[in-house]
Amino acid sequence: MVNQTILVVDDEKRMRTLIRDFLNVKNFQIIEAADGEEAIEIFLEKKESIDLVILDVMMPKVDGWTVLRTIRQNSKVPVIMLTARGEEQDELFGFELGVDEYISKPFSPKILVARIEAILKRVNGEKEEKRNYDGIVIDESGRTVSVDGKKIELSLREYELLKYLLDNENVALSRDKILNNVWNYDYYGDSRTIDSHIKKIRHKLGKKGKYIETIRGIGYKFEIK
């Protein structure tokens, strides 16, 4: 497999060097950007060759949120946000904008590498299979979803959440179980993160969003009635 390329965006040179050194050991190709403005220029120029973005929130010139919006206007590439903040609202805001993973500083570089590998494995290792749920078609080889023949745009996390619901059709799933299976690691934030993602998925599914049923006091269930 060709070495995968990761864009690392952080205004702290020490942080970029730390991340680069750990990722180089795993044979990742690294592109660095020292601020949001430079990150946007690099991404728009090289977006076809970038496999994942590690993006700091607080940066000079252009902040991480603005960079993320630009990325999402042009690509579904996985994005991991780094932040020194621990505020719940910041995390929810990031997920609303399409963040795939959220890591607060300080963090373990080994954990960061593990999360990167897990995300890329899921993105690149899906089975070649299409499944149809009353017009909701999920193509695991291309990691795409269409509704009545029309493709819908989902972030990596939205796709994985919808896929997990479909894989467990007619099964009531608790929020804790969803977090542990979809987020792939124990998540210590508020479970309202799930509610936010479900709301966006329902909207994108249109009339068929009704198949995602809220189970009061438990969580959610995908059921075609």
Image: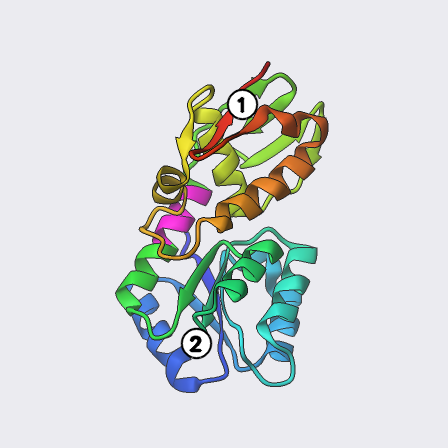
Q: Residue at x 36, y 42 (%)?
A: 176
Q: Position of residue 156 (x, y in %)?
A: 52, 46
Looking at the picture, how far across and down is residue 87, in whole percent? 47, 69
Residue 206 in percent (x, y) is at 71, 31
The amino acid beneath tag 2 is Ala
Queried whether the magenta region covers residue 119, the answer comes back as yes
Which sits earlier in the primary sequence, circle 1 or circle 2?
A: 2
Q: Which mark is residue 84?
A: 2
Residue 210 falls in image quadrant:
top right
Residue 69 in view, yes or no: yes
Cα distance in 3D space between marks 1 and 2: 40 Å
From what the image shows, is residue 67 above or below residue 221? below
SS for callout 1: strand
Would residue 1 be seen by someone viewing this image from the given angle? no
- The amino acid sitting under disc 1 is Lys
In the image as oriented, which residue stretches furthest toward the top?
Answer: 225
Magenta residues, start to end: 117-123
